[in-house]
């Protein structure tokens, strides 16, 4: 910090903070929000289950794809349009 910025800060006029009112929420609106939160939590749990399933599938697929790509005979049997996808998968997960 340089002297001018410190002097500027010290010379500033002290002001009160401006308070903002909170909006009034009715009981029915609170219930709707609570139900929405419960719905979002259920969706989150389902998404987490799906994510775990996908992670397991990826883990199982990496072994097979690694074996295919390392074996010249097996990799020659893979169609050309699919080979690019396997190589991209290997770059990301292997």
Image (cartoon, rainbow, N blue to C red):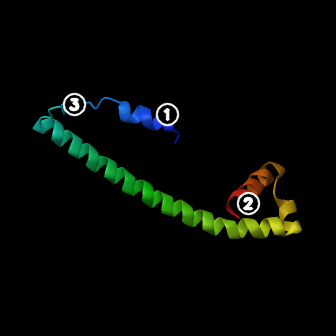
For the residues marked 2 and 3, what is the alpha-carbon distance in whole angstroms? 54 Å
| Residue 81 or residue 53, whichever sits in front | 53
Residue at position x 16%, y 42% from top?
Answer: 31
The residue carrying pointer 1 sits among few (fewer than 14), some (14 to 19) or many (20 or more) residues within 10 Å by Cα, namely: few
Residue at position x 11%, y 38% from top?
Answer: 27
The secondary element bearing badge 2 is classed as helix
Please determine whether, in this image, residue 45 is positioned above or below residue 20. Answer: below
**Which callout, 2 or 3, points at the residue further toward the start of the chain?**
3
Side of 19 where 61 appears, left or right? right
The residue carrying pointer 2 sits among few (fewer than 14), some (14 to 19) or many (20 or more) residues within 10 Å by Cα, namely: some
The secondary element bearing badge 1 is classed as helix
The residue carrying pointer 3 sits among few (fewer than 14), some (14 to 19) or many (20 or more) residues within 10 Å by Cα, namely: few
| Residue 15 or residue 28, whichever sits in front | 15
Q: Position of residue 10 (x, y in %)?
A: 37, 36
Q: Identify residue for label 2.
A: 90
Q: Identify residue for label 1.
A: 4
Side of 24 where 64 appears, left or right? right
For the residues marked 1 and 3, what is the alpha-carbon distance in whole angstroms? 33 Å
Q: Identify residue for label 3.
A: 20
The secondary element bearing badge 3 is classed as loop
Mark 1, mark 2: which one is toward the viewer? Answer: 1
**Which callout, 1 or 2, points at the residue further toward the start of the chain?**
1
The numbered disc on residue 46 is: none
Q: Quadrant of the C terminus?
A: bottom right
């Amino acid at each position: 910090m340089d002297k001018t910025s410190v002097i500027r800060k010290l010379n500033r006029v002290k002001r009160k903070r401006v308070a903002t009112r909170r909006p009034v929420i009715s009981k029915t609106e609170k219930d709707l929000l609570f139900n929405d939160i419960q719905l979002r939590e259920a969706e989150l749990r389902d998404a987490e289950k799906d994510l775990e399933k996908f992670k397991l599938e990826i883990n199982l697929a990496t072994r097979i794809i690694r074996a295919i790509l390392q074996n010249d005979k097996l990799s020659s049997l893979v169609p050309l349009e699919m080979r690019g996808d396997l190589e991209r998968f290997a770059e990301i997960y292997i």
